[in-house]
């Protein structure tokens, strides 16, 4: 769209706050802005992208995350009606539909807009910190780029090195005066007519499942598997056994790890079956002779495209689908091999399958499960945000509302953008 065309568009009254810069938040913000509404997009991390940025591929086309994210980032750059803030937290919300007063805290990045991503600060920084983006499977420097497709594409200085010699070295190494160690938190106040909560999800804590062996180095979660397979992950896309970097000959996937379990998550997380089937393709592509064992209660492949994908995986002679809930995961202390113990629900046979590595398909937990949002927000018993469709004003989208895949999240976010707009036009 040219500047001339944009100038001719009617500017709609009222503005919308979108909290969360993952795929749902990006979609909601763009859909509202591109029909003329002013949008404020707030993200707590230093980069937009959310969980999708951590994936190797996502359904239905098995695209890399750069496929969709880069297009959305470009749309944000080209749209002057979107104002985005990273490293930002919503502190308070007051008011009513059509007229909310919102206070947002902007945390310091210690790097300004002059940053060219030359990486010199990272080179001289000696401090190493756990890399949360890679689920602590590796370390990162105290001066770091959040991810390979970060937006904004700008470095961050960790607050953990502020006041150290490393921080001073970073300043000295920067040729562009981009590092400001005296940055302070700031507070801004916004007036908005509607709020869309796109606060996303996190993987269920596998350490709470005492029978599935997450304490063993060769038992990982499905999101950790995504990072192992990702080209920008801790092993540069090589799926290797964590304990000794051994190549994979046999791997086990344990479905419903904590999901559909009254002691953990009582609900189905929707994506786990398809995630494991997808990850089976990662292993088979990289190791043509490897055997894949998937232990499941039910395989849930919602929709025609996913059912077709499931049937394709079933035809692979090296993929073994075993209907049976896993009772225990054990480790051989000498070899670090993993044994998955289950009962085949079809034959009644007790199975003990020894594999190089096991992947726990942990479920989705809304980020609002134990951290409540400011304002009069309603939740269901599992911590998902409930949209106020009757009164309007506040809406939840994506995995803040319920477990969803990427495509469904986009569709849901479009719908919630429309609901937010309806709040504005009805006032």
Image: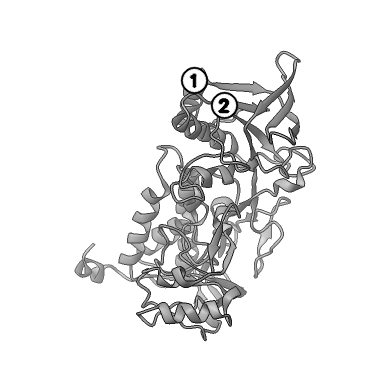
Is 337 on the left or on the right of 67, as rendered?
A: right
| Residue with the most extreme top position | 347
Between 207 and 71, the residue placed more toward the observer is 207
Q: Position of residue 342 (x, y in %)?
A: 74, 25
The answer to whether 322 is drawn above or below residue 234 in the figure is: above
Mark 2 or 1, which is nearer the eye?
2
Badge 2: how crowded within 10 Å, few (<14), some, or many (20+)? many
* Tag of residue 316: 1
Between 139 and 381, the residue placed more toward the observer is 139
Residue receiving disc 2: 292
Residue at figure coordinates x 58%, y 46% from the top left: 224
Is 263 on the left or on the right of 29, as rendered?
A: right
Instruction: Give the quarter of the image for residue 103.
Output: bottom right
Instruction: Give the quarter of the image for residue 89.
Output: bottom right
Instruction: Give the quarter of the image for residue 12.
Output: bottom left
Is 248 on the left or on the right of 220, as rendered?
A: left
Residue at figure coordinates x 66%, y 67% from the top left: 376
Q: Secondary structure at mark 2?
A: strand
């Amino acid at each position: 769209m040219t500047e001339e065309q944009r100038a001719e568009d009617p500017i709609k009254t009222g503005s919308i706050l979108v909290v969360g810069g993952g795929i749902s938040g990006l979609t909601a913000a763009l859909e509202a802005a591109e029909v003329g509404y002013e949008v404020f997009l707030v993200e707590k991390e230093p980069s937009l992208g959310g969980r999708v940025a951590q994936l190797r591929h996502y359904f239905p086309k098995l695209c890399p995350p750069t496929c969709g994210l880069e297009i959305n980032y470009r749309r944000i750059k080209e749209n002057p009606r979107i104002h985005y803030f990273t490293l930002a937290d919503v502190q308070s919300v007051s008011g009513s539909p059509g007229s909310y007063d919102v206070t947002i805290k902007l945390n310091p990045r210690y790097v300004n807009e002059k940053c060219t991503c030359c990486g010199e600060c990272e080179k001289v920084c000696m401090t190493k910190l756990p890399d949360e983006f890679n689920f602590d499977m590796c370390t990162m420097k105290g001066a770091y780029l959040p991810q390979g497709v970060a937006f904004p594409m700008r470095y961050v200085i960790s607050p953990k090195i502020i006041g150290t010699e490393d921080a001073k070295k970073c300043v000295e190494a920067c040729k562009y005066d981009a590092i400001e160690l005296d940055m302070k938190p700031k507070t801004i106040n916004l007036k908005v007519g509607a709020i869309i909560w796109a606060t996303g999800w996190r993987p269920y804590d596998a350490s709470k499942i005492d029978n599935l062996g997450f304490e063993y180095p060769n038992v990982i979660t499905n999101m950790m598997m995504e990072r192992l397979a990702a080209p920008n992950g801790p092993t540069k896309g090589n799926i290797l056994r964590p304990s000794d970097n051994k190549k994979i000959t046999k791997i086990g996937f344990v479905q419903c790890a904590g999901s559909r379990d009254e002691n953990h998550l009582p609900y189905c997380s929707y994506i786990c079956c398809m995630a494991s089937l997808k990850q089976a393709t990662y292993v088979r592509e990289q190791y043509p002779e490897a055997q894949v064992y998937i232990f499941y209660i039910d395989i849930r492949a919602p929709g025609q495209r996913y059912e077709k994908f499931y049937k394709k995986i079933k035809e692979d002679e090296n993929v073994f689908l075993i209907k049976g809930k896993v009772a225990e995961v054990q480790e051989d202390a000498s070899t670090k091999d993993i044994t998955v113990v289950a009962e085949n629900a079809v034959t009644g046979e007790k199975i003990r399958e020894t594999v190089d590595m096991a992947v726990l398909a942990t479920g989705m937990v809304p980020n609002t499960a134990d951290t409540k949002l400011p304002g009069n927000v309603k939740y269901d018993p599992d911590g998902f945000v409930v949209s106020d469709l009757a009164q309007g004003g506040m809406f939840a989208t994506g995995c803040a509302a319920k477990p969803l895949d990427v495509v469904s999240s986009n569709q849901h976010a479009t719908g919630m953008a429309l609901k937010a707009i309806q709040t504005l036009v009805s006032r």
